[in-house]
Image (spheres, rainbow, N blue to C red):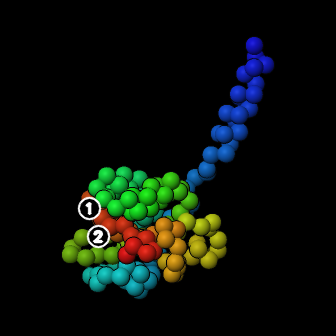
């Protein structure tokens, strides 16, 4: 009887080992000019978020994608949101803080690529193409939620 369970155990063990590892890193961008330039909006000031603060938008992404999917009418955009959700562990994030209207926000980019030395610098990556492989968001720190999500071809 135990011989029939052995192949099943081996398959389960292989599937468990094939699961993706921990998410790619969140890089904190602490250069004020870099944050001002990349965010694309007029900001009142900048700040350097803690590592825990910088990881908050990534933790909120699944909730935001689910919420947007339910509200979205465009089938094309729904499919893009679904594809982002399916690959969300494969993005390298960069986040920097800014202040506007007396509130604190984070501007983040997240790029679906293997992390390399260039991508792990404390600068927002410059990517001019890529669709859902190159996304950005604004995160409202007071509400603890992503307030805006864009990707190349959508902004």
Instruction: Give x and y (percent) for residue 77.
Output: 39, 63
Q: Residue at x 34, y 78 (%)?
A: 46
Quadrant of the rendered structure where residue 4 is? top right
Categorize mark 1 by other alpha carbons within 10 Å: few (<14), some (14-19), many (20+): few
Would residue 135 be visible to someone looking at this image?
A: yes
Q: Residue at x 50, y 53 (%)?
A: 86
Quadrant of the rendered structure where residue 38 is? bottom left
Helix or strand or loop: what does disc 1 sit on? Answer: loop
Distance Cα–Cα, label 1 vs label 2: 7 Å
* Sequence-first tag of 1 and 2: 2
Furthest toward the top, the residue is 1
Q: Is residue 102 rendered to the left or right of residue 138?
A: left
Q: Is residue 11 rendered to the left or right of residue 19?
A: right
The residue under label 2 is 104
Quadrant of the rendered structure where residue 154 is? bottom left
Instruction: Give x and y (percent) for residue 92.
Output: 54, 66
- With respect to residue 17, does 90 lie above or below? below
Instruction: Give x and y (percent) for residue 40.
Output: 35, 82
- With respect to residue 92, does 59 lie above or below? above
Q: Nearer the viewer, residue 51 or 1?
A: 1
Furthest toward the front, the residue is 75
Would residue 94 be visible to someone looking at this image?
A: no
The circle drawn on residue 142 is 1
Furthest toward the left, the residue is 101
For the N terminus, which image quadrant? Answer: top right
Helix or strand or loop: what does disc 2 sit on? Answer: strand
Pointers 1 and 2 in contact (C-beta within 8 Å): yes
Instruction: Give x and y (percent) for residue 138.
Output: 34, 69
Q: Residue at x 34, y 61 (%)?
A: 74
For the C terminus, which image quadrant? Answer: bottom left
Q: Residue at x 59, y 67 (%)?
A: 113
């Amino acid at each position: 009887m135990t011989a029939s369970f052995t192949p099943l155990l081996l398959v389960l063990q292989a599937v468990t080992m094939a699961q993706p590892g921990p998410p790619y890193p969140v890089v904190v961008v602490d250069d004020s000019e870099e944050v001002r330039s990349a965010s694309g909006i007029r900001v009142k000031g900048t700040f350097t978020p803690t590592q825990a603060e910088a990881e908050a938008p990534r933790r909120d992404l699944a909730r935001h994608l689910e919420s947007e999917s339910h509200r979205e009418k465009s089938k094309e955009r729904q499919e893009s949101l679904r594809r982002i959700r399916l690959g969300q562990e494969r993005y390298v994030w960069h986040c920097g803080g800014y202040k506007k209207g007396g509130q604190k926000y984070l501007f983040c980019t997240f790029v679906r690529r293997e992390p390399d030395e260039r991508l792990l610098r404390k600068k927002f990556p410059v990517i001019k193409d890529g669709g859902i492989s190159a996304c950005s968001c604004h995160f409202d720190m007071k509400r603890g939620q992503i307030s805006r999500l864009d990707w190349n071809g959508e902004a």
